[in-house]
Image (tube, rainbow, N blue to C red):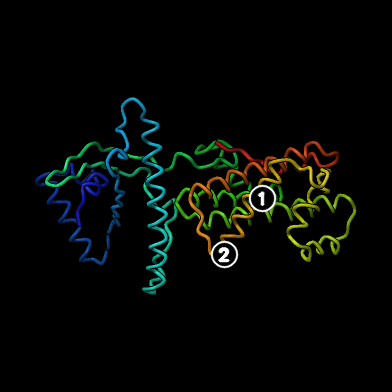
C-alpha cells in the first residue's frame, strides 16, 4: 500500500511527470517481459505517542530531536527484526530473516502526524541519517587510505593477528546499531574470548611455555582464564584489575550469560553499552601491554581506533 513515507523515500519517481513518467513505466514493462525483475521493499513503522509525549519538532534543538527519533527508530527496528525472524521460521521462508545494517538506505524518511477524532494534521517531516555512527578500526573512515589498509590486512593477516577479534566486535557494533541486540551481546563476548586466547598464547610463548601447555588453556574454566590467568599474564594483581576489566565481567559478560542461557532479550541500550564496554576492555589490554616489559610490541597489534 502506498504511503507518504514511501513517496518520500522514492522521491526520484515523484519528479517524473507526464510523458517522462509514462516512458519510465513502459521501460519497466519491457524489462519485465524479458524476465528482468525490479522491486523495492518498503516497510512503514509507526510509534504512537500520547498527549505531551510527542517529540518537540526540530527548531531550537535539532540534535535532541534527532536523538529522540533515532531512539524510537532503533526500538521499532528491533521489533521488526524479531518479527521477521519469527515469520521466516514459522513460514519456512529461509530467505526472510534479520535485517543487516548495510541493507538499509543512508537515510530514512520520517513523518510526525497529530491524530484526533475527526482531525489529522502533519506536524513535520524530514530524513534521519543511519550510517553516521559506525566505528573506524583502521585508517580514516571512508577514504583511500582506509581501503588500502583493509586490503593489506586481508593479504597479510600475520601483521594483525588480533584482526579476527576486532572484526567480530566491529560486527557486534553493527548488530547493535541495527537492533539485533541479543546477537550483538553474544558476538561482543565472543570477540573478548578470541582476543584473550590470542593474547595468552602469545605471552606464554614468549615466556617459554610449550604449545601443549598453551593448549591446556582450553580445559580451564573461562572464569579462571579471564579473572586469574589474564591478569597474571599482564602483571596485574588478581582482584586489582580495575573497573574496566572487572566491570566488563560483572555487567557485559553477565548479560551475555543471561542472553545465551536464560532466553533473556537484551534491549538496544544494553547491547550498545556492552559493545562500548568491550571496546574499552580492548583499550585496557593495549594499555597493560604497553606498560609490561617485553610485551610492548603486542600493543601495536591491537590497532583500536574509533570515531
Graded by Cα atoms within 10 Å as few (under 14), some (14 to 19) or many (20 or more), the crowding at tag 2 reads few
Image location of residue 146, percent across then percent down = 56, 40
Q: Residue furthest top?
A: 60
Residue beneath label 2, please?
A: 262
Numbered tag placed on residue 160 in the rendering: none
Q: Residue furthest front?
A: 51
Image location of residue 185, percent across then percent down = 56, 54
Image side of residue 252 versus residue 200, left or right: left
Residue beneath label 1, please?
A: 250
| Residue 139 figure quarter | top right
Q: Between 297 and 243, which is closer to the camera in this rendering?
A: 243
Circles 1 and 2: CB distance less than 8 Å?
no
Residue in the picture at 22% in, 61% down? 31
Which callout, 1 or 2, points at the residue further toward the start of the chain?
Answer: 1
Split into 4 quadrants, where in the image is the N terminus?
A: bottom left
The answer to whether 43 is drawn above or below residue 92 in the figure is: above
Q: Between 142 and 293, which is closer to the camera in this rendering?
A: 293
- For mark 2, give the secondary structure: loop
Q: Residue furthest right?
A: 208
Split into 4 quadrants, where in the image is the C terminus?
A: top right
Q: CA distance from mark 1 to mark 2?
A: 17 Å
Residue in the picture at 66% in, 50% down? 250
Report how many numbered discs are placed on residues in the image: 2
The answer to whether 119 is drawn above or below residue 24 in the figure is: above
Image side of residue 264 versus residue 257, left or right: left
Residue in the picture at 79% in, 46% down? 239
| Residue 16 figure quarter | top left
Amino acid at each position: 500500500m502506498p504511503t507518504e513515507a514511501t513517496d518520500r523515500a522514492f522521491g526520484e519517481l515523484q519528479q517524473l511527470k507526464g510523458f517522462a513518467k509514462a516512458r519510465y513505466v513502459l521501460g519497466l514493462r519491457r524489462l519485465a517481459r524479458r524476465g528482468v525483475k525490479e522491486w523495492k521493499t518498503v516497510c512503514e513503522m509507526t510509534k504512537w505517542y500520547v498527549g505531551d509525549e510527542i517529540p518537540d519538532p526540530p527548531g531550537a534543538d535539532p540534535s535532541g530531536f534527532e536523538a529522540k527519533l533515532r531512539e524510537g527508530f532503533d526500538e521499532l527496528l528491533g521489533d521488526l527484526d524479531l518479527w521477521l525472524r519469527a515469520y521466516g521460521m514459522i513460514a519456512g521462508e529461509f530467505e526472510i530473516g534479520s535485517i543487516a545494517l548495510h541493507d538499509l538506505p543512508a537515510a530514512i524518511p520520517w513523518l510526525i502526524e497529530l491524530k484526533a477524532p475527526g482531525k489529522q494534521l502533519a506536524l513535520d517531516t524530514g530524513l534521519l541519517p543511519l550510517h553516521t555512527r559506525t566505528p573506524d578500526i583502521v585508517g580514516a573512515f571512508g577514504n583511500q587510505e582506509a581501503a588500502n589498509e583493509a586490503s593489506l590486512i586481508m593479504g597479510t593477516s600475520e601483521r594483525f593477528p588480533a584482526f579476527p577479534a576486532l572484526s567480530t566486535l566491529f560486527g557486534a557494533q553493527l548488530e547493535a546499531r541495527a537492533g539485533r541486540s541479543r546477537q550483538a551481546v553474544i558476538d561482543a563476548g565472543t570477540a573478548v574470548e578470541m582476543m584473550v586466547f590470542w593474547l595468552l598464547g602469545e605471552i606464554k610463548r614468549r615466556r617459554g611455555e610449550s604449545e601443549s601447555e598453551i593448549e591446556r588453556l582450553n580445559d580451564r574454566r573461562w572464569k579462571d582464564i579471564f579473572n586469574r590467568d589474564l591478569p597474571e599474564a599482564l602483571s596485574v594483581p588478581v582482584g586489582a584489575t580495575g573497573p574496566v576489566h572487572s566491570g566488563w565481567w560483572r555487567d557485559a559478560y553477565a548479560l551475555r550469560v543471561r542472553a545465551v542461557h536464560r532466553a533473556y532479550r537484551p534491549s538496544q541500550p544494553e547491547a550498545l553499552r556492552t559493545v562500548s564496554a568491550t571496546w574499552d576492555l580492548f583499550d585496557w589490554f593495549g594499555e597493560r601491554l604497553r606498560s609490561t616489559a617485553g610485551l610492548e610490541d603486542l600493543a601495536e597489534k591491537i590497532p583500536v581506533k574509533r570515531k
